[in-house]
Amino acid sequence: MTKRLTTIKDIAKALGISVATVSRAMRDTYDVSAETRKLVLDTAAKMNYRPNFNATGLVKSGTHKIAVIIPAITNYYFSTVITGIQEYALEQNYQVMLYLTNDSAYWETKVVRELSLSSVDGLLACITYETTDFSHFEELVEADMPLVFFDRVPESVKTSVVVQDDYTGACMATEHLIAQGYSKIAHLAGPPGLNLTQQRLQGYLDTLKKHNLESYGVIHSGFSDENGREDMSTLFNSISRPDAIFSVNDRKGFGVILWLREQGIMVGEEVGVIGFTNDPTSKIISPSLSTIAEPAYEIGRKSCEVLIRHIQKQSYPTQQISLPTELIVRESTQRKSIGIG
């Protein structure tokens, strides 16, 4: 069993002082006495706490390094976000250190707790779909480390966030399906604990209610095309089959289209499909996938901008930024009339 790393929260508890005081002592800031600083550093050494910058002065002058934690790098959305982050960071003379969690809450916690010991000026983070305990992030906030969440954000950690407008995007997707004549609309949702899952589900449900329509099924699962295939098998085993699918993301939507084609069901004509991302593959798959375009690059730039503002000005106010999405209409929601004629 892996021994848990000592955190500054442990040191604060042992000394009966605040986490913020421990953090400031390690940074050697002007408002901490020499006696307190020595006590903190001695206690840290006894508890095997291993900070990389406890006596270097790097934090005072600034390392000009920021850490980015993401669940995946191989999908379009995250790679585009990283491009936005990297470009803005370089413009401001900051280096980016990238950490991959592979959607594992264990690895996320391990990375964050080790980051709290390392010489970075701030952190950008997108949580895993497994994460339910956010204490590792709360420790960073208590220690005054600048922290900004993007895309998947926890509601309980009080810090800046930059997201796409998931609720309005879901409303647009559902409105589009209804305008095309679909009325039996199901939603293939993401993992239930994620904020974006909840926002997209709520937008879908509220739009159905606005038009006096009932939901034809909601299934929570992951974000892969295989999840889309499995969800469709479940939906179409029921008596009441939907005539349209709103998928929480494009990759799951690709699985929906492939499953429908394998079953000999015409996409668009018989069952409409709309996704959420605007992955480049949505233009290539046949039929092409209607979707809600997310401003991934802009989210990367804006989240990095907000983080650097927090780094450069401790009193910079917490930001709650929601960037607009856009409806992209393609073949998968073109409902041609079916019948003789």
Image (cartoon, grey):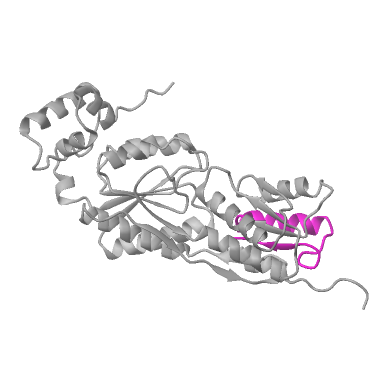
Residue 204, by quadrant, is bottom right
Number of labelled discs? 0
Q: Is residue 340 magenta?
A: no
Q: Where's the C terminus, which quadrant?
A: bottom right
The reply, left or right, for residue 225 in relation to residue 131 is: right
The residue located at (21%, 37%) in the rendering is 20
Residue 265 rendering spot, x and y as whole percentages = 82, 60
The residue located at (86%, 71%) in the rendering is 338
Residue 273, by quadrant, is bottom right
- Is residue 296 at least partly visible in the picture? yes
Residue 88 rendering spot, x and y as whole percentages = 33, 63
The residue located at (71%, 58%) in the rendering is 245
Work out whether residue 277 or residue 51 is closer to the camera in this orientation and state it: 277
Q: Is residue 257 above or below residue 113?
A: below
Q: Is residue 252 above or below residue 328?
A: above
The reply, left or right, for residue 186 in relation to residue 83 is: right
Q: Is residue 266 magenta?
A: yes
Q: Write the start and end of the magenta stretch as one range.
A: 248-276
Residue 142 rendering spot, x and y as whole percentages = 28, 39
